Image (cartoon, rainbow, N blue to C red):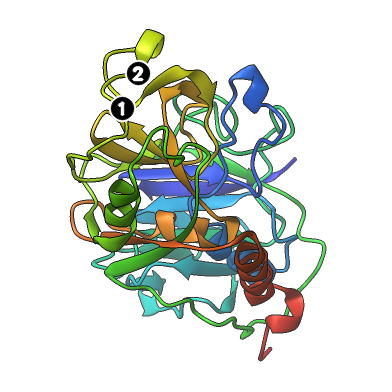
Amino acid sequence: MSALLEIVDAGPQTTVQDYPGRLGRLADGVSQAGPMDHVALRAANTLAGNDAGAAALEVTLGGLRVRFPDARTIAVCGAVAPVTLDGEELPLWHGVAVEAGQELRIRMSKGPGFRLYLAVSGGIDVPPVFGSRSTHTLAALGGLDGRALRKGDRVPLGADARPIPPGRRLRVPDYVRAWEVEVMLGPQAAPDFLTAGDVERLTARAWNVDAASNRTGLRLEPFGFEWARSGGGIAGGHPSNVLDDGYPPGGVNMNGDTAVILGPDGPTSGGFVVVATVVHGALWKLGQVRPGADTIRFVPVTIEQAVALAREVDGWVAPEAVSGG
């Protein structure tokens, strides 16, 4: 029988997520899900001795309290927040040994950053759905009964087969309030849709992130673009309208005159243009942007720069990047 992690308090939203999430189902209308910040989740798993993509807990803002059923190695990575183990301060981005009955508490984060990830050696052992344990609450898929965790839940843990010495650590990414997010323009940034001035304005300004943002998407402040056409033709009356097309995770979706950066739980297709796409190496930043407080500036990059950034970021969480222990 699996050991069970007791949820003493779940906070505003805590879900089970793994990396890279539910791949290969976009054509079926099933969103990818997975972590908002894939760097912090993979780092926590690496420090806990798990495979980097193992299922862990994604904690939005804080408020999580858990009690451990047995001795484990754990790690908490992500936003700046007070974290304690039986009332004693716990370092972030470090592997830590815990004993049966000890209680971990993640208090509310004041930033910078917005989400934290708790990895426990052995991983979270909920059943995979379509190849992933990730929770998609809107579709009620994965995780624990397809929902966010609640007070009193008991979450199954996998066998702790690889003892890892505590004290190991990884570098902490730069968490800021004004984020620069690397994007590639398109697939619909062509002159048929946006004017050259629109593209310049898209990438020149710092965009305020609306408080009405979540795992489905980050909503940016409305802005009046010029647009290269007066309407969407048979697709609709607004120039942002197109016949339904596929949406990539991280796509900058123009919903009328409001840009929404699609998150891992976002729609897989729809009838609005996608004028830019956040590259893999920058997707983690979307998980740490604080809605209603932080800003985003888009930085256009080439395909070669995007590949180099992805390799650099993957190197941050590689086993050989671990020090100490």
Residue 91: x and y in percent read 46, 80
Q: Is residue 11 visible?
A: no
Name the residue at 69% across, 53% down: 54
Q: Residue at x 24, y 61 (%)?
A: 206
- Lateral position of residue 303 relative to residue 299, left or right: right
Residue 231 horizontal/vertical position (percent): 29, 19
Number of numbered markers:
2
Where does the N terminus fall, quadrant-wise? top right
Q: Pointer 2: what residue? A: 232
Image quarter of the C terminus: bottom right
Residue 86 in the image: above or below residue 149: below
Q: Secondary structure at mark 2?
A: loop
Q: Position of 88 compared to 160: left or right? A: left
| Residue for point 25% across, 45% down | 220
Disc 1 + disc 2, Cβ < 8 Å:
yes
Q: Quadrant of residue 273?
A: top left
Q: Position of residue 100 (x, y in %)?
A: 59, 63
Q: Residue at the top extreme?
A: 234
Q: Which residue is mark 1?
A: 229
Of 138 and 174, nearer the camera is 174
> Residue extending furthest bottom?
324
Q: Amino acid at mark 1?
A: Arg
